[in-house]
């Protein structure tokens, strides 16, 4: 039954669905644990142990082979799809806000409350780069779909566009006519050309990733309009 309900004790902070197994799901929450489970298979579950604070983010690699979990303990852990721990990635001095995988390989990108973004090789656990420059918690970010660029947004109301190899900040988008409050979310167009960002100030902006220029702006939209518009954009990327 694909329409079953699973109840977990405590708050849930993260959910991720496998891109290759239609019933495999990962969840994480305030009990410092994660779980792998299968929709419609109540007798199958694997507990992900090892975090010492809430599991705040989860993401499957694009090939579906690995799962990454991030916690408020500042750790990223890498698991296989049976729930076996492959490696623990350390470095950030604050909680993990989000995790993303490179679209073409086993590279992990994670934003932290300590104003930094970290990139690791998930296969050997090595740190490849640390992106420093934001002035507050890095609340959202991702690789572009072509894998050549990184975009990150922060509580400092800026969008930064990075070279993943050199760690150089190519563009810093801030000030008028951009957001006046912290960024909360971003999404990137399928052709790796534009980033769409949302903010606590209630506006949505479209930014040209190549030039760093702010394009269209959507101001004073209602919460319902914002959610509908952003979901439509996400669906267009699929």
Image (cartoon, helix red, strand yellow):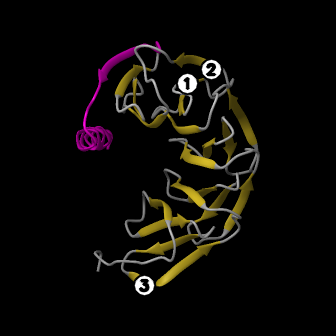
Where's residue 113, x and y in %? 64, 42
The answer to whether 5 appears left or right of 74 in the picture is: left
Residue name at image x 30 percent, y 75 percent: 2
User: Tag 3, which secondary structure?
Assistant: strand
Q: Which residues are magenta?
A: 211-238
Q: In the rendered image, which quarter is residue 137 located in?
A: top right
CA gap between label 2 and label 3 equals: 47 Å
The residue under label 1 is: 160
**Residue 154 shows up from this direction:** yes
Q: Earlier in the sequence, mark 2 or mark 3?
A: 3
The residue under label 2 is: 169
Q: Earlier in the sequence, mark 3 or mark 1?
A: 3
Q: Earlier in the sequence, mark 2 or mark 1?
A: 1
Where's residue 68, x and y in %? 59, 56
User: Tag 2, which secondary structure?
Assistant: strand
Disc 2 packing (10 Å; few <14; some 14–19; many ≥20): some
Residue name at image x 58 percent, y 17 percent: 170
Residue name at image x 63 percent, y 49 percent: 96
Numbered disc in front, either 3 or 1: 1
The residue under label 3 is: 42
The answer to whether 114 appears left or right of 61 in the picture is: right
CA gap between label 3 and label 1 equals: 43 Å
């Amino acid at each position: 039954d694909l329409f079953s309900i699973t109840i977990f004790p405590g708050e849930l902070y993260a959910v991720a669905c496998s891109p290759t197994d239609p019933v495999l799901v990962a969840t994480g929450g305030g009990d410092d644990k994660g779980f792998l489970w299968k929709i419609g298979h109540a007798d199958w579950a694997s507990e992900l142990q090892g975090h010492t604070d809430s599991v705040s983010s989860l993401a499957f690699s694009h090939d579906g082979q690995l799962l990454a979990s991030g916690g408020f303990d500042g750790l990223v852990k890498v698991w296989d799809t049976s729930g076996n721990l492959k490696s623990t990635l350390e470095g950030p001095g604050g909680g993990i806000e989000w995790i993303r995988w490179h679209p073409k390989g086993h590279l992990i990108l994670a934003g932290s409350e300590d104003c930094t973004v970290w990139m690791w090789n998930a296969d050997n656990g090595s740190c490849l780069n640390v992106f420093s420059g934001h002035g507050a918690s890095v609340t959202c970010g991702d690789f572009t779909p072509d894998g050549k660029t990184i975009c990150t947004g922060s509580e400092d109301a800026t969008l930064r566009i990075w070279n993943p190899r050199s760690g150089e900040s190519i563009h810093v988008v801030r000030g008028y006519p951009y957001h006046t409050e912290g960024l909360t979310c971003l999404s990137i167009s399928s052709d790796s050309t534009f980033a769409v960002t949302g903010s606590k100030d209630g506006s949505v902006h479209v930014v040209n990733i190549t030039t760093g220029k702010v394009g269209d702006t959507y101001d004073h939209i209602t919460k319902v309009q914002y959610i509908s518009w952003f979901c439509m954009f996400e669906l267009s990327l699929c």
